Image (tube, rainbow, N blue to C red):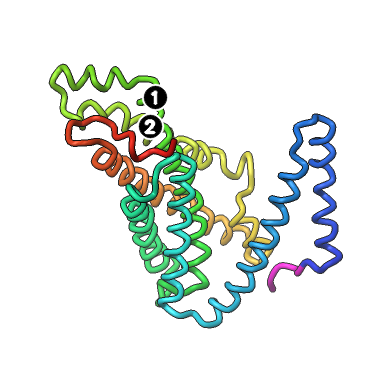
Amino acid sequence: MGAKDLNLYSMMFVYLLLIVPLIISLLTKIKFEVKILISVIRMTIQLGLIGLYLNYVFQLNNLWINLGWVTIMAVVSSYSMMGSCRIKAKYLLFPILASILLPLLATIFYFNHFIIGIDNVLSAKYLIPISGMLLGNTMRGNSIATNTFLNYFRSNEKEYYFALSLGASKNEALRPIVRSSITSALSPSVATMATIGLVSLPGMMTGQILGGSVPMTAIKYQIAIMVAIFTSMSMSVYLLTSILQRKAFDKFDILRKDIFKK
């Protein structure tokens, strides 16, 4: 038995909840009313269209359509990450896309084959939802790692050049920066795993319970997806920092300014 459907009357009450943040915005004069309404309208339209599309994709369950959809998700994720870090796509789109897509596919294959144990590891029912969870967390981790990496040069650039002047190689001079970037990216996920279940009930577990799964089965799936998310993000962040070390510097080991948007 699946989760109870929400009819039009139920959805009306969902949107009535927005009255509270709108009133708070008005009382505090933060002028968020229009942004809130636009965001909710966009979310409704986007998720509605995705729901209609996924019904078609799940029924068709074509290998190339499934992989194509995941690739589109990864491309959008790459563009979003580069936008938040103000990086020009023409210089780093494909390396960043590779750092996202390769760990994602490797984790998906492992997860679906060895953990869930399904024959068709690229089945739309498993591939697309799980990819979405992995990509969302990976994008956040990569954004943190990239911003940490680049922000270092906005405040501590002289330390890097001083290390080079003492004879350190580029990789040696960048090692503390890379460590800091990876630590900053992974720390939120480590903290989440340490408190999950005590502080919050995660979405996948709640969704499975609402969908009719027994709590212990839902917990096992939640543990599995959390570990998969953390592994995929770790690989992606490591690849990304390696790419930045190679692509973000010129032949004189100077940080390239032309890769950034003004």
Q: Tell me if label 1 and label 2 are in contact, CB under 8 Å.
A: yes
Q: Position of residue 201 (x, y in %)?
A: 63, 48
Q: Is residue 2 magenta?
A: yes
Q: Nearer the viewer, residue 193 or 76?
A: 76
The secondary structure that dominates the magenta segment is: loop
Q: Nearer the viewer, residue 192 or 97?
A: 97
193 w.r.t. 109: above or below: above
Amino acid type of disc 1? Arg
Mark 1 residue element: helix
Indicate the position of residue 146 as horizontal and vertical percent values.
Answer: 40, 38
Using a 10 Å C-alpha cutoff, classify the residue at mark 1 as few (fewer than 14 neighbours), some (14 to 19) or many (20 or more): few
Quadrant into which the N terminus falls: bottom right
Residue 154 is tagged as: 1
Residue depicted at x 37% and y 36%: 182
Residues at marks 1 and 2, CA–CA distance in whole angstroms? 7 Å
Horizontal arrangement in the rendering, residue 94 relative to residue 143 (left or right): left
Q: Is residue 255 above or below residue 45?
A: above
Mark 2 is on which residue type?
Leu
> Which residue is painted at 29% across and 38% down in the image?
248
Find the magenta span and give its range: 1-5
Q: Position of residue 96 (x, y in %)?
A: 35, 50
Q: Quadrant of residue 240?
A: top left
The answer to whether one can see residue 15 in this image is yes
Label number found at residue 137: none
Position of 29 with respect to 136 (left or right) is right
Find residue 172 and report its horizontal and vertical position in percent.
20, 28
Which residue appears farthest toward the bottom when viewing the image?
Answer: 60
Q: Is residue 4 magenta?
A: yes
Residue at 38%, 68% in the rendered image: 113
Q: Badge 2: few (under 14), some or many (20 or more) residues near its Cα, within 10 Å?
A: some
The C terminus is located in which quarter?
Answer: top left
Read off the residue under disc 2: 150
